[in-house]
Image: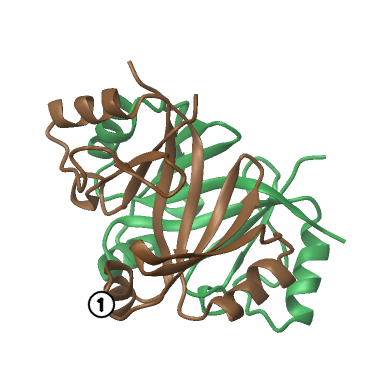
Chain colours: A brown, B green
């Protein structure tokens, strides 16, 4: 049995990272802990920790990534909601048993070695949901 | 000086509350603590506490509310991001000084007596941001 304990992050697609940081960091006062290039996602990301969660400002560094296409189609705004799960394999099994459409049928691994998978928004009422496995 | 300490909730606009609860509650396993009619917002809301935050599933109960119009235009999905702030008046002053466009220039008060205000998505890079004042 797997369970979800918290919102890990809310990712916001932005068209200008420096301008977005003026709003989120300088005006709202949420400190940016790190600005990182993520070449395999063709994105630059600003991480703004907030309580037990994080706001992530995601800026596309190419014109043909999924993120860039999302922005062309829908405009800037909230891109996805990431939930932290204690057992990703068990959760993915449960989702498949319930005929939930997944973008990643198997866990993917990010730069830090952490495992994640996306649920297709079609099965999540329009929300792109990421599941991020908790580090034990 | 006012500061933001956590994500209070993420509100998700849904077109079928019972079906959305099947996904969020029965399959993902996030318990619904309360289902409430909010007549002044022409909405029915399911509250799903998650760590220090909450997922709110928001269903329009009329066809001409802002929420219903949002769904007609953009479809179901994440509607807004609510941040908890310790001093709403001070935060609204700071936002005005920085020429941030507000939907509510002055705090509004909800059913439980808690004060809140919305920032216009035009000034928040496409995100509808709600500020909710922390109960002292």
- Estimate the x, y position of residue A102 in percent, counting from the top left: 19, 43
How many discs appear? 1
- State the residue at coordinates (24%, 52%): A121
Q: Dot 1 lies on which element? A: loop
**Quadrant, the N terminus of chain B:** bottom right
- Estimate the x, y position of residue A4 in percent, counting from the top left: 42, 28
Q: In this picture, is A41 found above or below B24?
A: below
Asked whether residue A13 is in view, the answer is yes
Of all residues, the one furthest to the bottom in this rendering is B99
Is residue A134 found left or right of A117 in the rendered image?
right
Asked whether residue B46 is in view, the answer is no
Front residue (pair A131, B109): A131
**Quadrant, the C terminus of chain B:** top right
Residue ID for mark 1? A64
Front residue (pair A53, B81): A53
Front residue (pair A31, B109): A31
Which image quadrant is residue B52 in?
A: top right
Of all residues, the one furthest to the right in this rendering is B1
- State the residue at coordinates (21%, 37%): A106
Q: In this picture, is B33 found above or below B91?
A: above
Q: Chain of mark 1?
A: A
Is residue B106 found left or right of A54 in the rendered image?
right
- Estimate the x, y position of residue B77 in percent, counting from the top left: 33, 55
Which image quadrant is residue A130 in?
A: top left
Front residue (pair A27, B109): A27
Is residue B108 found left or right of A43 in the rendered image?
right
Q: In this picture, is A82 found above or below B87?
A: above
| Crowding near the residue tagged with mark 1, few <14, some 14–19, many ≥20 C-alpha atoms within 10 Å | few
- Estimate the x, y position of residue B31 in percent, counting from the top left: 41, 25
- State the residue at coordinates (77%, 58%): B88
């Amino acid at each position: 049995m797997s369970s979800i304990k918290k919102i890990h992050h809310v990712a916001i697609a932005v068209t200008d990272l420096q301008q977005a940081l003026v709003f989120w960091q300088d005006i709202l006062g949420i400190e940016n802990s790190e600005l990182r290039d993520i070449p395999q996602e063709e994105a630059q990301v600003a991480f703004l920790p907030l309580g037990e969660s994080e706001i992530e400002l995601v800026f596309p560094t190419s014109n043909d990534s999924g993120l860039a296409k999302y922005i062309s189609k829908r405009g800037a705004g909230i891109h996805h909601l990431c939930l932290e799960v204690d057992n990703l394999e068990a959760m993915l099994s449960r989702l498949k048993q319930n005929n939930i459409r997944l973008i990643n049928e198997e866990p993917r691994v990010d730069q830090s070695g952490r495992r994640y998978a996306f649920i297709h928004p079609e099965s999540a009422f329009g929300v792109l949901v990421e599941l991020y496995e908790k580090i034990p």
